[in-house]
Amino acid sequence: MAEQLKKCKRGGCNKQFKESENTGNSCKFHPGKPIFHDTKKGWTCCNKIVYDWDEFSKIEPCAEGMHSDLDPMQAAQGQDGFFKSETVNNAQKAIDKSENKPVIKKISDYNQQDDKKEAQQQQVQNGTEKKVFVTPSGNLKCTNKGCQKEYKEEDNKDDSCKYHAGAPVFHDLKKFWSCCHTVTYDWDDFMKLPTCTVGRHQPKFV
């Protein structure tokens, strides 16, 4: 009988593996927690902050170890020494002590941040005018959540963009969008959630 494939649930991995081939350096993963604060995205275990979803998903894992099919919370309570390490604990403590806690757990928090972001954008519009970001291929980059595709302005129609009108919500192990409420637990499942809104692409400014 062929050995059954398992799915690794460590942050930043999510690969399938065979237990017989699971060694001490099979998995490259993030031992910390994901950070989502305003438009900033990162991991508590890394010193890198990005702003786009595709850039966040491409952040290189900072730890190696064995694959695990346990949920991160279960692994932290079990035999996983890295999750219990002082490095991770100290990083989390530093974040928890900050004035603006970056790990968002409530939809109301996102709504408040969206209002703040809109006010900041209005201030920018009233001050220095920003320029539209153009990719190396000569396209524009959509900033709508769940889209972020490249496009040409002449092809931008009222139904060109499929995106999420709400904000991502991460509470305990649950992951969903405030506009959809379809709950998932894996990162790849969350990233594959179907969008719920249709409209025009919104260009990225720099």
Image: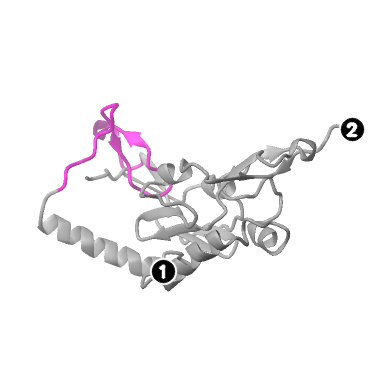
Q: Position of residue 16 (x, y in %)?
A: 68, 39
Q: Residue furthest right?
A: 1
The amino acid at mark 1 is: Lys
Picture residue at 37% right of the left edge, 38% below the top: 149
Question: Of all residues shown, which one is farthest toward the top?
Answer: 137
**Quarter of the rendering occupied by the N terminus:** top right
Which one is in front, 160 or 84?
A: 84
Q: For the residue labelled by badge 2, is the local secondary structure a helix, a strand or a loop?
A: loop
Residue 62 location in percent, x, y? 52, 46
Residue appearing at x 31%, y 39% in the figure: 141
Please tell me in which quadrant of the rendered image residue 22 appears. top right
> In the displayed structure, does residue 58 sit left or right of residue 128?
right
Is 14 magenta? The answer is: no
Reading the image, the residue beneath label 1 is 101
Task: Give, as a three-letter code, the residue at label 2.
Answer: Met
Please tell me whether residue 101 is drawn above or below residue 177 in the rendered image.
below
| Magenta: main secondary structure | loop
Residue 81 percent coordinates (x, y): 66, 57
Q: Quadrant of residue 4?
A: top right
Could you tell whether 179 is left or right of 156 in the image? right
The foreground one among 148 and 14 is 14
- Residue 1's mark? 2
Residue furthest front as drawn = 86
Residue 156 belongs to the span the image colors magenta = yes
Which residues are the magenta region? Answer: 130-159
